[in-house]
């Protein structure tokens, strides 16, 4: 039995990644969790954050948006709104998006209908910056 785990990261536009990995770490809504081959089956919702996996001893990082993950003993399927690999993220654009979101939030009250949307944009830009710096 191989120690590898099949991982698929799927967005509405494309298959962002498909291949065997040694482990994967996922930003679940109840907290970050790691998966190795033989993990108990589970379904989890996924938060904006950093997803990473190890393949051939090397870590690969993705900034991910919200979605769902299905784990079985030999496969992890991630259905996600967006997934950006660290080396494809434009750090300057992410920093500008963060600054813009922070400026907009400073002008909004938590009760404003737009507040949650802008706050999520801020979280996405923070995740993108963090992943891009890996």
Image (cartoon, rainbow, N blue to C red):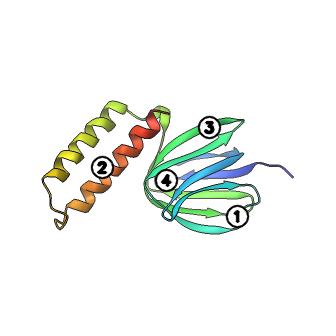
- Residue 59: mark in rendering: 3
Mark 4 vs mark 3: in front: 3
Horizontally, is 100 left or right of 90 in the view?
Answer: left
Residue labelled with disc 1: 72
Q: Is residue 122 left or right of residue 89?
A: left
User: Which numbered circle lies on residue 20?
Assistant: none
Q: Which residue is mark 2?
A: 122
Which of pointers 2 and 1 indicates the residue nearer the eye? Answer: 2
Q: Which residue: 18% across, 66% down?
A: 113
Q: Earlier in the sequence, mark 1 or mark 4?
A: 4
Helix, strand or loop at disc 1? loop
Foreground disc of the pair 2, 4: 2
Between disc 1 and disc 4, the foreground one is 1
Task: Give neighbour class at mark 2: few <14, some 14-19, many 20+ (Cα, 10 Å).
Answer: many
Instruction: State yes or no: discs 2 and 3 in contact (Cβ < 8 Å).
Output: no
Q: Residues within 10 Å of mark 1 (few under 14, many from 20)?
A: some
- Where residue 11 sits: x, y (%)? 49, 53
């Amino acid at each position: 039995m191989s120690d590898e785990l099949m991982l698929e990261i799927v967005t509405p536009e494309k298959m962002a990644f498909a291949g065997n990995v040694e482990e994967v770490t996922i930003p679940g809504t109840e907290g970050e969790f790691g998966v190795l081959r033989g993990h108990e089956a589970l379904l989890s919702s996924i938060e904006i954050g950093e997803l990473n996996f190890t393949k051939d001893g090397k870590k690969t990082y993705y900034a991910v948006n919200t979605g769902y993950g299905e784990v079985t003993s030999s496969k992890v399927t991630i259905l996600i709104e967006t997934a950006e690999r660290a080396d494809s993220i434009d750090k300057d654009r992410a920093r500008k998006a963060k600054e813009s979101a922070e400026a907009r939030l400073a002008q909004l009250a938590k009760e404003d209908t737009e507040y949650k949307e802008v706050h999520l944009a801020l979280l996405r830009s923070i995740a993108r910056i963090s992943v891009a710096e890996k």
